[in-house]
Image (spheres, helix red, strand yellow):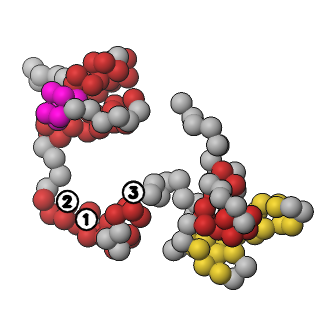
Amino acid sequence: MAKLDPIPARLAALKDTTTVDLKRQWRELFDSAPPPYNRRYLESRLAYRIQELAYGGLKSESVSRLERLGDELDGGDRKKSRTRTDLMPIAGTRLIREWQGTEQVVTVTLNGFEWQGRPYKSISALARAITGTQWNGWVFFGLKNHRSRE
């Protein structure tokens, strides 16, 4: 008779585990203090670590390839690599915002944003150019709520 794999049940149990216990598991599995991130982050990293220890991690060739691909995407710029690409609008997207009675149209490009024919690397710099004041560009264009989402 084949023995059942306990890993799927252990992964499913993470959803019902208290945050205190998730942090305890983190200390055990990573041999370090848990980071100050949200519960969802802890769950996903713990799930990966549990599987990594049980089934093995990525091959060194895969890690090297991923690092090369990452460098190709962000040019080795660590700040760019921390930008969550899943939150970035797709290149070609048009962001439209009315500001002081004038419609402002911004195009998302592969390298940032374009407004009135000029390139901008950050959406906040662009919002500052439009308004003349300090703005969080994600909030200005309605891409992010100004209140944190818990």
Where is residue 38? Give x, y as percent.
Answer: 41, 33
Residue 39 shown left or right of residue 150 in the figure: left
The amino acid marked with disc number 2 is Val
Q: Quadrant of residue 25?
A: top left
Magenta range is 26-32
Between 37 and 94, the one lying in front of the other is 37
User: Which tag is nearer the camera, tag 3 or tag 2?
Assistant: 3
Q: Earlier in the sequence, mark 1 or mark 3?
A: 1
Say whether residue 52 is visible: yes
- Any mark on residue 63, and which? 2
| On-image quarter of the N terminus | top left
**Residues at marks 1 and 3, CA–CA distance in whole angstroms:** 14 Å
Q: Measured along the vertical axis of the image, is residue 23 above or below residue 124?
A: above
Q: Give the amino acid type for the residue marked by disc 3 in the picture.
A: Arg
State the mark number for residue 82: 3
Determine which quarter of the picture holds residue 147: top right
Label 3, secondary structure: give it. Answer: loop
Find the distance from the CA under tag 2 to the CA under tag 1: 6 Å
Quarter of the image where one finds residue 5: top left
Identity, as a three-letter code, of the amino acid under mark 1 = Glu
Residue 111: image location, x then y, percent: 51, 74
82 on left or right of 90:
left
The mark tally for this picture is: 3
